[in-house]
Image (tube, rainbow, N blue to C red):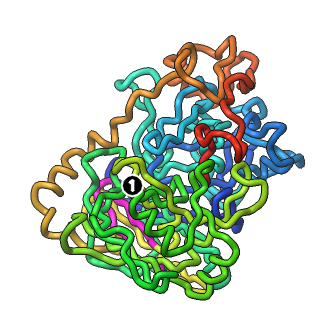
């Protein structure tokens, strides 16, 4: 980004007013792609870098008749749609079938039909930001049931690490459409007041949506887990067993809105089982709540408090408290034919899976500053009507005389004293590497060891290396082939009496 005396304003992305997902009801945001535009309801992904949009191949004969709508797809040209119809967009430039390269650690996998197209934030004529020729992927896998918008800044690499393709967030900042590479986000809470919608600000944050604290976290050295916090303990009060501490030994957890659940050590999950009367479904790996326990828990209204620190073992720390209603969710198709009460914790196989998912972000507001390699986590607040107080986070590349109304970074001051020295310096020094590095993406074509959900067509539209260099916003002068599912590669069907392997994830 270059110095510019005309400082841009943060972009407050208005939520869609809808509640989506097959694991709980979540406040979604509207994204449009293609020419003419096709609209989708998506979830922000704090751990993602790219844009994922469902394609029609993801809805099969075994899915509900309204599968497209359930996956966040709006009608297109007056007719219901099951996903992004690439052959209806005059600005779509195909690139090939590649793996999605996200959430592999949680065993959530899949591949996408990658290409470039015009992408806008918000519905048409809403003054939303719009960029041409942006990386996007059409997805059929149900591991990501609703589309995703990656809030990270890392580029994609299709043909080699020396040819990175900037992503949407990076392009917004480079074109001075937002003040900096940063964002503020809370997932919203359907159970609060009159259904409080989510809040997402690019290039800043909404100061009216949280209670600030003085704790700032440096990015983790592992750039695939940048938003890692020390979870020192979890304390439950007013449960079926009164007060207990399911997590007593501190550990490091990734904050990741891509997934809805909280992934915990098995020992912690077992204590939650006792405190909340949970039933473990070893087919779906979900925790269910029967009718009588559900009624009793609603009466007790337990509180679950997460004690977070930069360290997992010592001060300073903050508390983020969640009411039982934040865990009072329902899972539906393709896991269960009817909405079923479930409690959003999952058994982690090891410490690399420890995750605070979207459930946590109902009551937490996260502010991430990629240019300073730090972030804050704050207790969310709720009001009806909900006011806005949008604050900008100024870029590190802007001169001090650029603006007096924007902040230098997220609230919370400097990184706490125990890490101001070597850790903070190291985090900042690797920022340039982090922003420009992305693991080379694996092309699915010709790899017989994979079980893709999308298969490369017989006559692809050119070499991916050539396509990644295309800058025209027009289609190449060849017929567009719609990627089709190979029914022999779908894996096991999603039935309760089957194996739990291959089950789709919750969104």
Q: Residue furthest right?
A: 78
Q: What element carries label 1?
A: loop
Vertical position of residue 284 compared to residue 413: above or below: above
Q: How crowded is mark 1: few (under 14 residues within 10 Å), some or many (20 or more)?
A: many
What secondary structure prevails in the magenta region?
Answer: strand
Furthest-left residue in this view:
421
Specify whether residue 295 is in view.
yes
Residues 348 and 202: in front is 348
Tell which of 295 and 375 is nearer to you: 295
Query: Is 395 placed left or right of 134 in the picture?
Result: left
Start-end of magenta stretch: 364-381
Q: Where is residue 229 in the image (x, y as percent from the top left)?
A: 31, 61
Compared with 393, 74 (above or below) is above
Image quadrant assignment for residue 370? bottom left
User: Which residue is found at the position 64% from the left and 19% from the top?
Assistant: 456
Q: Is residue 374 magenta?
A: yes
Q: Is 414 within the magenta?
A: no
Q: Is residue 255 visible?
A: no
Instruction: List the residue tagged with mark 1.
Output: 354
The quadrant of the image that shows the C terminus is: bottom right
* Residue in the image at 63% along x and 69% along y: 289
Q: Residue at x 16, y 50 (%)?
A: 426
Residue 230, image quadrant: bottom left
């Amino acid at each position: 980004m270059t110095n510019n005396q005309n400082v841009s304003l943060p972009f407050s992305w208005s939520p869609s007013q809808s509640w989506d997902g097959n694991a709980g009801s979540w406040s979604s945001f509207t994204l449009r792609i293609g020419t003419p535009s096709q609209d989708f309801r998506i979830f922000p992904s704090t751990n993602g870098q790219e844009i994922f949009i469902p394609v029609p191949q993801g809805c099969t004969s075994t899915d509900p008749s309204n599968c497209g709508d359930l996956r966040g797809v709006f009608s297109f040209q007056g007719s219901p749609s099951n996903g992004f119809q690439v052959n209806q967009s005059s600005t779509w430039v195909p690139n090939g079938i590649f793996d999605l390269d996200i959430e592999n650690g949680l065993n959530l996998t899949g591949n996408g039909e990658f290409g470039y197209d015009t992408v806008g934030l918000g519905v048409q004529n809403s003054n939303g930001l719009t960029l041409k020729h942006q990386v996007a992927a059409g997805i059929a896998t149900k591991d990501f049931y609703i589309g995703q918008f990656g809030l990270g800044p890392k580029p994609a690499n299709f043909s080699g690490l020396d040819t990175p393709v900037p992503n949407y967030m990076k392009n917004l900042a480079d074109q001075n459409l937002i003040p900096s590479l940063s964002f503020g986000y809370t997932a919203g809470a359907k159970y609060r007041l009159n259904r409080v919608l989510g809040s997402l600000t690019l290039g800043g944050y909404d100061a009216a949506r949280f209670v600030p604290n003085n704790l700032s976290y440096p990015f983790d050295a592992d750039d695939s887990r940048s938003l890692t916090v020390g979870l020192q303990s979890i304390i439950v009060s007013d449960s079926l067993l009164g007060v207990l501490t399911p997590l007593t030994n501190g550990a490091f957890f990734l904050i990741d809105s891509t997934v809805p659940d909280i992934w915990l050590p098995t020992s912690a999950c077992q204590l939650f089982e006792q405190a909340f009367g949970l039933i473990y479904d070893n087919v779906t790996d979900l925790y269910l709540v029967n009718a009588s326990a559900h009624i009793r828990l609603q009466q007790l209204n337990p509180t679950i408090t997460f004690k977070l620190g930069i360290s997992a073992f010592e001060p300073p720390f903050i508390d983020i408290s969640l009411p039982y209603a934040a865990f009072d969710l329902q899972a539906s198709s393709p896991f269960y034919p009817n909405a079923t009460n479930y409690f959003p914790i999952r058994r982690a196989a090891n410490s690399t899976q420890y995750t605070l998912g979207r459930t946590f972000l109902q009551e937490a507001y996260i502010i991430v500053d990629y240019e300073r390699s730090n972030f804050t986590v704050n207790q969310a607040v709720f009001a009806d009507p909900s006011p806005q107080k949008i604050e900008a986070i100024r870029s590190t590349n802007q001169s001090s005389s650029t603006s007096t109304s924007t902040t230098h970074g997220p609230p919370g001051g400097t990184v706490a004293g125990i890490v101001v020295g070597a850790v903070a310096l190291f985090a900042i020094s690797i920022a340039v590497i982090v922003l420009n590095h992305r693991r080379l993406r694996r092309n699915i074509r010709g790899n017989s060891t994979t079980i893709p959900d999308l298969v490369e067509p017989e006559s692809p539209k050119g070499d991916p290396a050539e396509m990644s260099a295309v800058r025209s916003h027009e289609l190449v002068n060849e017929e567009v082939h719609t990627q089709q599912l190979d029914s022999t590669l779908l894996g096991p069907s999603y039935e309760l009496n089957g194996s739990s392997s291959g089950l789709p994830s919750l969104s």
